[in-house]
Amino acid sequence: MPHIPLPEHLPGITGLLEYRLDTAMPIRELTQLLLRGESTLTQGERELIAALVSSRNKTNFCNAAHTKAADLLLGEDQTAAAVKADIETAPVSEKMKALLQIAAQTQKSGRAVTSEAVARAHAAGATDREIHDTVLIAALFCLYNKYVDGMATVTPTDPAYYDTLGDRIVNRGYNRPPGGHPVPKTVTTNS
């Protein structure tokens, strides 16, 4: 049960964003820019960073949502699971392995990012901007994970919920829908 009253039909971060539209606006804009804006990293690669960090932070809502978004963007459901299990054996490029290691270090602590990890990413072809954005995405998802878990938001257990949410993330991005989120006729969530 959430620590404060939140819209029951909006689990996870969605209810928190609706609770304070003024703070939600810059959060949504930054997320849209980083995960859907212009980048040499694909949208699927950026969602992998979000899924990895959320998985390591054990934030079930964000882990499930961003794993599903990565799966949809990559067109399969093996890579995100492999990245979360073992970055070094995952079926991603050497550059992505290096960037994902930087994301994992950032998840532990900003000070955990090593010059060796950055040198590895550069040697694998990562640009300064890709390294910057990887750290920023990882840090942003640490914020989201703490926000979601710190407010004890509702986490749906039905995988079908995340199918719908993943599709919404992929096709609409992180912007608030015009008019907000209407209350559906039936809502099924579990705390």
Image (spheres, grey):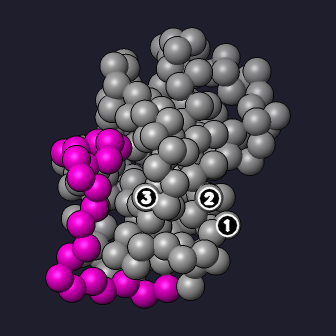
Mark pair 3, 2: CA separation: 13 Å
Which dot marks residue 133? none
Residue type (three-letter) at the residue carrying disc 3: Glu
Q: Residues within 10 Å of mark 2 (few under 14, many from 20)?
A: some
Mark pair 2, 1: CA separation: 5 Å
Q: Residues within 10 Å of mark 3 (few under 14, many from 20)?
A: some
Main SS of residues in magenta: loop
**Label 3 vs 1, first from the N-terminus:** 3
Q: Quadrant of residue 165?
A: bottom left
Residue type (three-letter) at the residue carrying disc 2: Tyr
**Front residue of this view, candidates 80 and 28:** 28
Q: Residue at x 43, y 87 (%)?
A: 190
Check if residue 177 falls in the magenta segment: yes
Magenta segment: 171-191
Q: Quadrant of residue 68?
A: bottom left
Position in image of residue 114 (x %, y %)? 77, 28
Q: Quadrant of residue 123?
A: top right
Check if residue 111 falls in the magenta segment: no
| Residue holding disc 2 | 147
| Residue holding disc 1 | 150
| Residue holding disc 3 | 18
Q: Quadrant of the N terminus?
A: bottom right
**Label 3 vs 2, first from the N-terminus:** 3
Position in image of residue 147 (x %, y %)? 62, 58
